[in-house]
Amino acid sequence: MGYEGDGHDAPVRHRAENIVADEKVAASRRGFLKSAGLGLAGATLAGLSGTAAQAAETPIGDKWWPSKWGAEDQAGASNHMGPQKTLEAVQNIKTGKVHSLGHVYEADMPLFGQRVFALRTPGMPTGGTFGDNKIIWNDEFLATEIGQVGTQFDGLGHIGVVTGEPGDHTEKRLYNGVTMAEAASPYGLKKLGIEHVKPFFTPGVLIDVMGLKGAMLEAGTEITVADLEAALERQGLSGDAIRPGDVVVIRSGWGLLWKEDNERYNSGEPGIGLEAARYLAEKQVSLVGADCWGVEVVPNPDSTQVFPAHQELLVRHGIYLHENLNLESLTADASWRFAYIFAPLPIKGATGSPGNPLAVT
Amino acid sequence: MGYEGDGHDAPVRHRAENIVADEKVAASRRGFLKSAGLGLAGATLAGLSGTAAQAAETPIGDKWWPSKWGAEDQAGASNHMGPQKTLEAVQNIKTGKVHSLGHVYEADMPLFGQRVFALRTPGMPTGGTFGDNKIIWNDEFLATEIGQVGTQFDGLGHIGVVTGEPGDHTEKRLYNGVTMAEAASPYGLKKLGIEHVKPFFTPGVLIDVMGLKGAMLEAGTEITVADLEAALERQGLSGDAIRPGDVVVIRSGWGLLWKEDNERYNSGEPGIGLEAARYLAEKQVSLVGADCWGVEVVPNPDSTQVFPAHQELLVRHGIYLHENLNLESLTADASWRFAYIFAPLPIKGATGSPGNPLAVT
Amino acid sequence: MGYEGDGHDAPVRHRAENIVADEKVAASRRGFLKSAGLGLAGATLAGLSGTAAQAAETPIGDKWWPSKWGAEDQAGASNHMGPQKTLEAVQNIKTGKVHSLGHVYEADMPLFGQRVFALRTPGMPTGGTFGDNKIIWNDEFLATEIGQVGTQFDGLGHIGVVTGEPGDHTEKRLYNGVTMAEAASPYGLKKLGIEHVKPFFTPGVLIDVMGLKGAMLEAGTEITVADLEAALERQGLSGDAIRPGDVVVIRSGWGLLWKEDNERYNSGEPGIGLEAARYLAEKQVSLVGADCWGVEVVPNPDSTQVFPAHQELLVRHGIYLHENLNLESLTADASWRFAYIFAPLPIKGATGSPGNPLAVT
Amino acid sequence: MGYEGDGHDAPVRHRAENIVADEKVAASRRGFLKSAGLGLAGATLAGLSGTAAQAAETPIGDKWWPSKWGAEDQAGASNHMGPQKTLEAVQNIKTGKVHSLGHVYEADMPLFGQRVFALRTPGMPTGGTFGDNKIIWNDEFLATEIGQVGTQFDGLGHIGVVTGEPGDHTEKRLYNGVTMAEAASPYGLKKLGIEHVKPFFTPGVLIDVMGLKGAMLEAGTEITVADLEAALERQGLSGDAIRPGDVVVIRSGWGLLWKEDNERYNSGEPGIGLEAARYLAEKQVSLVGADCWGVEVVPNPDSTQVFPAHQELLVRHGIYLHENLNLESLTADASWRFAYIFAPLPIKGATGSPGNPLAVT
């Protein structure tokens, strides 16, 4: 199964021969997800019995709209942001040390699926020479999936659920029930664009699951609620440390493969599953980040499910994801609590944002 | 004179007929700088007598390298950043209010010269449908001069000076004396790329020159040291409020034209000149920002000079520029002092960075 | 009404206030189609009575699939190509003169809607120096709507008809009844891509309607069958000169505005309407070209219709369009008959092709 | 040695350690040219004695400008085109069969160095729904090194020679002695752009060296004049079959690896060397094509030389190259002589052109 396409013909493409064929294409490109084994046979929704699944209003359970921030809301869990959270976060700033959690953007970084990153510097110099001061200047030209490469912040327009017939865009729904028919546009989303997100300045908590386990987790390993709580306890914290509006970032160790083994990095990942996603949603966090490319476990241990935590967090709760973080510096300092500061790049109609989130201690 | 080209043929292009011809091209595109009147006749360097100019080591005066941070430095005035400046900045955070100083990025924003901004959303959806959870996703594809459009942070690879013969890349010099021969590459600068800049978390000072003058300044109006000091005094501050490593942002009012009259916005601007640039450099600021597209006055009142403050700040002192800021919210609150937080997008080899700088009070 | 968007919400956007709003956007960009007056009030399909329209199988009349070349065909009227047509075309080659019918591609050419054309030359040089032979090389990087800018050949994946409910991609149909659900993909069409088109080497006929009228036709002027036949007669030809598989190119004179007045050029155009499109389809031509941007009259005199000739030719008959041709050289030579040679750029999954069609006499 | 960069620092980069380092980068991307062994040790120019090399005016021998078509010429060997060559070519058209010599353009094709090919289809549909005729349309957006990917025609701005000091753009010379200082621009070459090339309609000759040898030639195998003449003889032709202005295309068999083994395809190639290039230049051909990515042997048996045939043909003689051709269909038909028809995509200031050349028999 290739990770692309419109999927109106999903029943056709689910046939095994297509999976093999498409995977060969993907593999010849970037060795992506060779054995993801996505969503073939399963008939039940994780966490629901078969009967309940039949009764569910949507493929992910009960309908999730309108949001608790109102039917018109486009900011999701960034609504937690505000003076109170800023001042709470400032309480975490004691030494003044600033940690960059972002990776450098470059053509050699791991890229998902068919995405590209192409930077070109025109002319060298691009402008000049002008004036007696003989000025010259340089630009750069970038062509890329800007919000979905490298360290990336997933916005609310990124993920959806098909709630109706294949091919019916009036029943492809995003956060707050927004339909693709309402949001889709060739020149940037008409709704739920990244420009609606409020800047993050809020307390952050790092949960070092690799530290708990003593080694990098393997692809396909699900991080459970018990793992999160045990890791917090090991760090001298508890689940109560996580308050509404806080950011949680999770270290799996997978990020150590970044640019060291891109093929393996892209082939799957450890991460949270639906259980931990629901736990964090109950805590009302504003964002969940991790040092892997999708925050959640891939392939999912429930082979009928593909990226279900993305839906639980982004679609149902408006909780953002921050992917491909570098958590090594924070971990080395045992800086479990910090101020998390990130202003998404406000590109009108974008589904996500690049950028370098800061953790200040 | 068109603002483009390699300029090896500068003597030829300085002929009046070429200026007219090139301007017609520019005007037919975006009405850029119709009457810039750049660098035609002058023989002297501003601030130097004709004799001194002849004696100067470079077109902008004495050689400026090695930098005070060493001959290998690529971080410039971001070297001021560190725990002490962070903690100083935190002292400015009292209410917890977060101001976004960045504009939204969109195709309709004013663009300099021939730069473009093209966002496309592939497929709608880009991925899916997959799994029993019927997930879909959306990406966006962006092609643009990423570091030099919209609200932009100029890096040290952006601006240079021709210090030798036209066409000689071993004497086109940037910050710290780095030559184009060393830095130039088709796939991102090999030196002075934006990835070397340290994130900004430092005290900021807003100087409201429009408030002082009572109206938006006109294009070609130079903001002087006297203006800056009078504005600070009006705000109950003085030049002493600016300490090494601080950020200074200047409100000219020109930003009120943003998307209201793009043609006029691009046609020139008010801003600082060489005098004020030197004043701010002596204060050892880390960054100068403004609510116009180039921070400095265009056309320069000295018609022989084209963007000389860019050279004074970026090339000679490694002091960064932040252009196309939105300073209206800060001004409305009379929030003259704040914490300035900005993490440049660390694109390897880029000349600048987009992003949304935050001012926290 | 802006010429963009997904249109699932077409009923809403048809409201007059939206038209004005969207037009303002378009105008601020490239002054496009200010007064197109598209599809507002009409209830009837041109050529059908109201009752017949209600009874029609699709918004453009009876269903048009399967094609006469079979239900699996993706080559349309290029199926006419073959040794016989080649040899017929060669009969038109007498002097050996080769006319280029294409315009140069450049950023300053007229562009439709929000399309862009951005060429950048990386590095200068892009590669080298290598070897004792001290080689260097240059590349260029282009970002553009490649098949839909400048002189362009419209492929069969370009145009469709909504045959069902808004938002239902299983009833958005292209040539041969192919649905968007089958063809759509973020990385190039899965069906009807330009790579299926057979190269054109066939007789061509130029119809000089401007010559007939004595002046450039105005935007909104429909070229009728009577016009075509009168023009042919003036040229010493008749409708019988057009045989199955031939190419017909029509000179309206609108192309004289190319780069002379881009705003006017884009604001509308003279061209054929449904009547002439049906006439040419009955002649079984393989391609219709013109010296304007859309071959057909805009705005359509029937204000309920938007680009109906595109649908008649491309969707119903698989007949290709060639837009933005330069017919001046052929006309100056009174070369009414020629060999038409064009090999579309075989970009997998593209909707159209750039290129320089040749007319050889 | 990486095939990129400005090379002002060529002496440094020639060191063996850098070769290894740069090769690792290239290999991690597309496995390009692992063992090219470029230009390390040699001190002599191929074909010249050491003494002569010291006396040579340029690194490739005597100066090559002005061209035989005049000092202002920008069309090179396409100047051979004209009515006489067209009519000669038509003599080769007997059956009317049209062979496409171009490959399909797609992301999975072999790409040289760091070049990319990224096609995205915006919106699906991109435009509509409009009118009672309910029209929709699709576009595509392409970002790529347009003239230097896939089947490609090398223009005269593509290749040059450093004739002076490293870093001196006034002594980097292209065809007709044009300097980079004259031609370079961030937005397309100012001289020698592809738009100056005249369309090709001329006799073509296929030389089947693979047929002669009985198997695909290996990378690094130089095709000699003796090979060319023996192959022609085997085909019942002789060197006299090649007349001024003709096109010669050479089949090495390397093209059989296209998309079958991209890594091997890119790792080197068989092809002509300087000797055969000079032979073809003496024949005054207009273009040399081949079924490999660079027409000439890589690595060159003379390890001091990198792409010297490119310089001999393009720079010294203005003879064009056509790379990545598909010659299998012509060979299967034993169609050694044909009309060669190709109209370069006239992109202003481009260094090359994509497209589908036709061979008509």
Image (spheres, coloured by chain):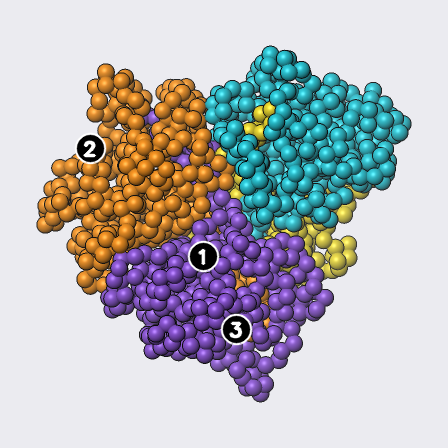
Chain colours: A cyan, B yellow, C orange, D purple
Give the structural element (helix, strand or loop) at label 1.
loop
Q: Are marks 3 and 2 on the same chain?
A: no
Quick check: D24 left or right of D178? Answer: right
Q: Amino acid at mark 1?
A: Thr
Query: Given the image, what chain letter belongs to the residue carrying mark 1?
Result: D
Give the structural element (helix, strand or loop) at label 3.
strand
Query: Given the image, what chain letter belongs to the residue carrying mark 3?
Result: D
Q: Which quadrant holds residue D348?
A: bottom left
* Nearest to the observer: residue A356 or residue A116: A116
Residue at image mark 3: D222
* Nearest to the observer: residue A15 or residue C317: A15
Residue at image mark 1: D151
Quick check: D339 left or right of B198? Answer: left
Query: Compared to A49, does D82 lie above or below?
Result: below
Query: Compared to B66, does C17 lie above or below?
Result: above
Query: Label 3 vs label 2: CA separation?
Result: 61 Å
Quadrant containing the N terminus of chain D is: bottom right
* Nearest to the observer: residue D147 or residue A343: D147
Residue situated furthest bottom in the rendering: D51
Q: Whole-percent x and y of residue D342?
A: 35, 59
Q: Residues within 10 Å of mark 2 (few under 14, many from 20)?
A: some
Q: Residues within 10 Å of mark 1 (few under 14, many from 20)?
A: many
Query: Label 2 vs label 1: CA separation?
Result: 41 Å
Residue C234 in sight in this render: yes
Q: Nearer the viewer, mark 2 or mark 1?
A: 1
Q: Whole-percent x and y of residue D269?
A: 54, 65
Quick check: C53 left or right of B175? Answer: left
Q: Are marks 2 and 1 in contact (CB under 8 Å)?
A: no
Give the structural element (helix, strand or loop) at label 2.
helix
Image label count: 3
Residue C37 in sight in this render: no
